[in-house]
Image (cartoon, grey):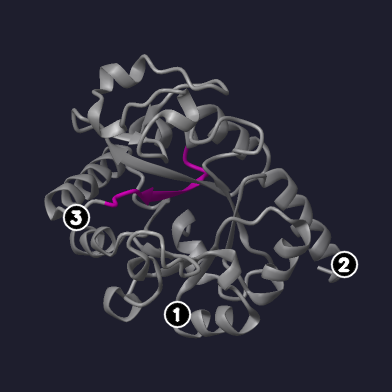
């Protein structure tokens, strides 16, 4: 049987994009929690997108922000707290912070898991440690055929391709924002050098022309973050490989209606 991951890269003429739940079903559950991942799969997602970073004791944790202020009302940074400390944190909307090992087990064998490596530091050793930690978790879960790695960090993409060349990765990039840090490295400028298997563009960068160009160059095109049904339908028509959405149930409905209207 063809692996889950391989299908997203080999189906250039697929009938509809895959639906990947952004931080799980984050429209209805606390983002990046085990409950959000379970809900995503119950709502018809093909898989989930989640964020990872290392805590102070080295474990790979599933969490988006650098600190706890937005989601837990606390000022501490994730990289300053131990696994034991993080086990005590209760998120404001409910739920707890999990490890990548726990998330992979919860998503199960039928979900594609897009693991976004969150690293904004400048030290190569820190990036290397996180990449190696993710690789160890994927190996431990025997999940190599059902994961896709992505990152805004060129160093993380480069490092992943070096240690796990058979597990594909994607480069995340966004509309240039000159006041953001470091904005040149959050664009697609390094695609020719990094040569990832996928591009993960912000929705605003996607037109019929840009999607066609990326597909012609051999990339899977996984677009973030899209919730509006009409835009989901438009991206499907352009040939997007996957839609990363906060509301997988709504996205699934939009794609079903689009397919029916097209006579599929």
Residue 204 point in image, percent of width and height = 60, 68
Q: Is residue 172 left or right of residue 11?
A: left
Which numbered tag is attached to residue 149?
Answer: none
Q: Left or right: where does residue 59 sit relative to residue 12? A: left
Do the numbered discs 3 and 2 sit on residues whose CB atoms are within 8 Å? Answer: no
Res. 104 image quadrant: top left
How far, Cα to Cα, is label 3 from label 2? 49 Å
Q: Which residue is mark 3?
A: 122
Q: Secondary structure at mark 3?
A: loop
Q: Quarter of the image holding residue 39?
A: top right
Residue under the image location 69 percent in, 53 percent down: 227
State which region is magenta.
108-120
**SS state under label 1:** loop
Q: Which residue is mark 1?
A: 218
**Circle 2 SS class:** helix
User: In the drawing, does residue 164 fall left or right of residue 13?
Assistant: left
Q: At which x and y percent is residue 187?
A: 40, 71
Callout 1 touching callout 3 (CB < 8 Å):
no
Q: Between residues 79 and 140, which one lies in front from this camera angle? A: 79
Asked if residue 115 is among those painted magenta in the image, a careful observer would answer yes
Residue 100 horizontal/vertical position (percent): 35, 35
Mark 3 surroundings within 10 Å by alpha-carbon count, few (fewer than 14), some (14 through 19), many (20 or more): few
């Amino acid at each position: 049987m063809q692996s889950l991951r391989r299908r997203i890269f080999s189906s250039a003429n697929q009938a509809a994009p895959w639906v990947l739940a952004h931080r799980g079903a984050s429209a209805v559950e606390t983002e990046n929690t085990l409950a959000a991942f379970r809900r995503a799969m119950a709502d018809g997602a093909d898989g989930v997108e989640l964020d990872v970073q290392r805590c102070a004791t080295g474990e790979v944790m599933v969490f988006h922000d650098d600190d706890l202020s937005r989601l837990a009302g606390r000022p501490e940074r994730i990289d300053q707290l131990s696994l034991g400390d993080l086990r005590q944190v209760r998120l404001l909307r409910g739920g707890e912070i999990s490890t990548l090992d726990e998330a992979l087990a919860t998503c199960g064998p039928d979900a594609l898991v897009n693991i976004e490596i969150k690293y904004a530091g400048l030290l190569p050793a820190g990036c290397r440690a996180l990449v190696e930690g993710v690789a160890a978790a994927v190996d431990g879960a025997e999940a190599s055929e059902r994961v896709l790695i992505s990152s805004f960090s060129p160093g993380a993409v480069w490092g992943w391709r070096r240690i796990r060349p058979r597990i594909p990765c994607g480069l995340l990039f966004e509309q240039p924002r000159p006041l953001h840090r470091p904005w040149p490295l959050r664009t697609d400028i390094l695609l020719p050098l990094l040569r990832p298997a996928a591009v993960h563009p912000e929705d605003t960068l996607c037109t019929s022309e840009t999607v066609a160009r990326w597909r012609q160059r051999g990339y899977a095109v996984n677009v973030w973050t899209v919730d509006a049904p009409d835009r989901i339908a438009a991206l499907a028509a352009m040939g997007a490989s996957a839609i990363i959405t906060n509301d997988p149930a709504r996205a699934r409905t939009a794609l079903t209606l689009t397919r029916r209207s097209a006579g599929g």
